[in-house]
Amino acid sequence: MKRFRTILFWTHLTAGLIAGISIFIMCFTGSALAFQTEITAWAERDARQITPPTADAPRLSIDDLIRKVREAEPDTRPSGIVVSSNPRAAVAFTLGREGALYANPYTGEIRRPASTKASNLLHTLEDWHRVLAMGGDNRSIGRMINGVCNIAFCVLAITGLYLWFPRSWSWRNVRAVALFDWTYSGKARDFNWHNVIGLWCAPILIVLTLTAIPMSYRWGANLIYKIAGEEPPTPSSGGPGGLAAGPAVEVPTPAPGAHPLGNAAMIAAAQNEIPDWESITLRLGNGRGTSGRVSRALEESGAAAQPKREGEGRPQSPAVSVSVKEPGSWPRTATTALTLNPYMGEVLKREGFADLPASRRIRTWTRFLHTGQAVGWIGQLIAGLACLGGCVLAYTGFALAWRRFFGQKKSSAN
């Protein structure tokens, strides 16, 4: 038993020394990214929040707001529209990593946040968290380093749980590793902090590191499919992070002369389908893979463009994708995906979280357990605090290692 503990100790120490710097960076950035959405929303509240003129003031249609956006910024091509049931929330026109435009649904005023410093800072922290802020062809190197160090962190947390537990169970020994002793200083303080924080944070850190593996490695994502008894997607057919892309929904052939409905009709169809909605996200066509003339024409009518089919006089619009967030959804990030007929507005397919294959349900949980969002703000707080604890573990671990290797020599010299 003593030999086994010695092997675990040196494994723990070696992994910590090799991966410690990367672990500290991931934990430091992760503590802020746990509330990335909330921090960005607060920092951009000048654009995101509006004041209704009256309690029953009429709202402009989505199509009117789209025209306002085009008038204000003709070169802007939004990728989606987000409508909230909160009467004080502006309608968001998403622009990818460029952020979003916000429209006052009562007046049509188009706004951008006065400052994007918070959003830019969080994007920088995210780049450090994922790829050590490496750019271009070096991003894969940064991702590989952080992926390996994440696995090392998981090993540290698992071995630490064993090492931190007292060898003999007594209240005095348990208290020494489970509670802070503020009278300690120097090595005793670092040892106490390393034990106490490690003991309380290790279970959370194990979850955070394990849930990062499917996002870092394809074999990790494929393992989820195998656990669920499903065939992993091939690299060419898989979506981001190894998620399989579902088959396209066939749109019934429209009547001759039929035109796609507007975006307002698509959102209204989603509201009718799910009356108790919290937010609705409508994806817009961005013209990729099509001519600009056809893309803009169909975008103005509320549907994405696709190339002409053989033998047809004009391109047929594909199905429209809408995501609906409902109050009390579980996990908290779950949405219901609606696929709508762009010509008639009826629901061609409805897919809620419970309808997803087991692999995608597991992937959803792992993706958002990593940030704590799957269980709401309490989960985010726990994840953020565990990351802060990880920062302290990295510091105290280096301090204890320094004293182990160099402190004794200094004492002998004196």
Image (cartoon, rainbow, N blue to C red):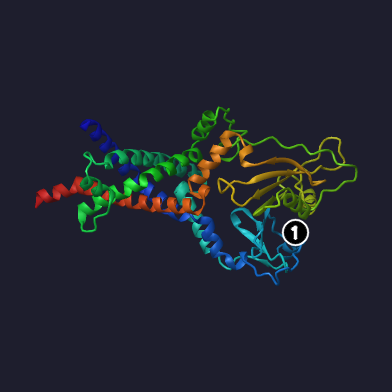
Q: Is residue 302 left or right of residue 279?
A: right
Is residue 289 something that shows in the picture?
Answer: no
Picture quarter containing residue 114? bottom right
Along the line of sight, the residue nearer the viewer: 29 or 380 = 380
Residue 142 is situated, as x and y percent measured from the top left of the image, at 45, 44
Q: Is residue 255 left or right of residue 386?
A: right
Image point (35%, 41%), residue name: 157
Please, which residue is most extreme toward the bottom here? Answer: 53
Image point (54%, 37%), residue name: 362
Residue 400 is situated, as x and y percent measured from the top left of the image, at 24, 48
Is residue 353 something that shows in the picture?
Answer: yes
Image point (67%, 44%), residue name: 337
Residue 190 is situated, as x and y percent measured from the top left of the image, at 25, 52
Q: Is residue 128 left or right of residue 270?
A: left
Along the line of sight, the residue nearer the viewer: 394 or 83 = 83
- Please name the residue that numbered disc 1 is placed on: 62
Residue 5 is situated, as x and y percent measured from the top left of the image, at 24, 34
Q: Is residue 194 left or right of residue 60?
A: left
Image point (75%, 47%), residue name: 304
Mark 1: amino acid? Ile
Q: Is residue 222 above or below residue 367?
A: above
Q: Residues within 10 Å of mark 1 (few under 14, many from 20)?
A: many
